[in-house]
Image (cartoon, helix red, strand yellow):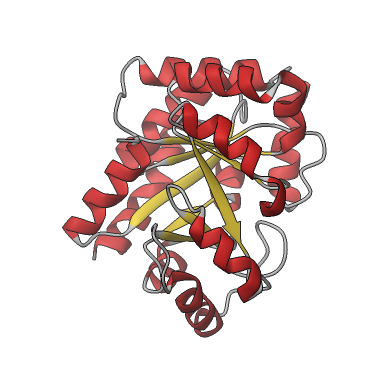
Amino acid sequence: MNRIDARLAALKAAGRKALVPFVTAGDPSRESTVPVMHALVEGGADLIELGVPFSDPMADGPVIQKSSERAIERKVGLTFVLEAVRAFRASDATTPVVLMGYLNPIEMRGVERFADEAAAAGVDGVLLVDLPPEEADPVREVFTARGLHLIALVAPTTTEARLGPLRTHAQGYLYYVSFAGVTGASKLDAGDVAAKAAVVRAHSPVPVLIGFGIKDAASAKALAAHGDGVIVGSALVQALAEAADPVATARAFLQPIRAGLDG
């Protein structure tokens, strides 16, 4: 069983919500990437989304855009990201890791080559922000053959006509974007999210995790009530960028969110 499926099933059985942090590989430094991943697990992460730096991160707000820019300046690319996952797996064989990024670096590498290398490194899933669902079948087939899940995004603007196929082909979890916009913005309306998330969750064969705009324990708990878990990105990336000790900061950032979700 894919680690994502196993972990989310265990959380559901225990009546707990998933806590999924996003961090950009190579930021705030190359050498801190793997220690930060371990610290996130120690802080309560159930799954880690590891951002693949990209020069044109169109879905991301300024915080994650800048983290990508800094990582690229440090010569962080797909090879480094896969090496980081492999190093993480040396002492953590159970925490799921999803690579989140854009299609271009994977196409440049070759979809089949990337899938082979990702599976060998210990990646469990991939979320490609700019891969339209109508064009995803060939990529999904390659990934599925190697045990990788292709994670889909669902937005508040996703039509029922498009939502149906997304549910049909859903793997791992559906990433529900809490509002129409880029990462890190502050537009959260829990009531609006509740109504739209309910539509997404109806008939979904996989858990629905809510992301975008979640900054702390209070916002995480408010939105987790309407999904199967939450994804925390920009606020964490900003905290790490400003940290004197990113490892300790990663752990300390997640602990109150974990406590809030469990409480």
In this picture, residue 162 sits left or right of residue 240: right
* Residue 116 image position (x, y, % from top left): 54, 18
Left or right position of 112 against 257: right
Image: 19 above or below 43? below
Q: Is residue 128 above or below residue 227?
A: above
Image location (x, y in percent) of residue 16: 25, 59
Instruction: Evaluate whether residue 211 shows in this view.
Output: no
Q: Residue at x 77, y 22 (%)?
A: 108
Comparing 33 with 197, the one in front is 197
Q: Residue at x 47, y 80 (%)?
A: 194
Residue at the extreme left: 14
Residue 186 spot, x, y in % from top left: 65, 69
The part of the image, by quadrant, that contains residue 241 is top right
Q: Which residue occupies the foreground of this view, 211 or 108?
A: 108
State whether residue 90 is above or below residue 236.
above
Residue at image position (70%, 53%) is 134
Residue at the image point whose x is 37% and y is 57% from the top:
257
Count of numbered circles on the image: 0
Q: In this view of the protein, which residue sits in the foreground, 67 or 197?
A: 197
Q: Residue furthest right?
A: 56
Quarter in which the N terminus is drawn: top left
Q: Quadrant of the C terminus?
A: bottom left
- In the rendered structure, the answer to whether residue 83 lies left or right of residue 182 reads left
Taking the image as drawn, is residue 259 in sight? Answer: yes
